[in-house]
Amino acid sequence: MRILLKSKIHKATVTEANVNYIGSITIDEDLMNKAGIVEGEQVHVVDDNNGNRLITYVIKGPKNSGIICMNGGAALLVKKGHEVIIMAYEVTSKKIKHKCILVDKKNKFVRYL
């Protein structure tokens, strides 16, 4: 068995950082669907501005809202306006085709990578 990249949202911009929430990352439902990420799924978040990396789970945000919100303690590591990469993985013994999407500064889908 191997852990392989399954999904990636590349160059997303954090729209909110709410330290008073009980943890997680809120992601626009449209982006979740395009990347193949489901609510409650574990994701790794990499902050391109400061190098911080964290693991959390996904909460579905309003569709086509562009929301990328860091919640709870994650909001101390990743701030509003920062550019992030969000990745999900799959444990499998099979070869899989990952879904990687590129978004613009307003977190609107640009294209598959």
Image (tube, helix red, strand yellow):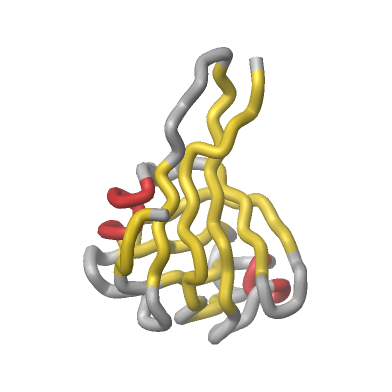
Q: Is residue 5 above or below residue 80?
A: above
Give the residue at x 49% y 77%: 13
Give the residue at x 36% y 43%: 36
Q: How many marks?
A: 0
- Residue 67 picture quarter: bottom left
From the top left corner, tell me how far across and down residue 66 is, in percent: 33, 74
Left or right placement of residue 81 versus residue 48 in this view = left
Give the residue at x 46% y 26%: 96
Q: Which image quadrant: the C terminus?
A: bottom left
Q: Is residue 90 above or below residue 36?
A: above
Q: Nearer the viewer, residue 93 or 65?
A: 93
From the top left corner, tell me how far across and down residue 107 is, in percent: 37, 74
The residue furthest right is 51
Left or right placement of residue 62 versus residue 47 in this view = left
Q: Nearer the viewer, residue 42 or 4?
A: 4
Q: Nearer the viewer, residue 58 or 102?
A: 102
The residue furthest front is 113
From the top left corner, tell me how far across and down residue 14 is, in percent: 51, 77
From the top left corner, tell me how far across and down residue 2 is, in percent: 65, 22
The residue furthest left is 63
- Residue 28 picture quarter: bottom left
Q: Is residue 113 above or below residue 61?
A: above
The residue furthest bottom is 81
Left or right placement of residue 81 versus residue 61 in this view = right
Left or right placement of residue 67 versus residue 86 in this view = left
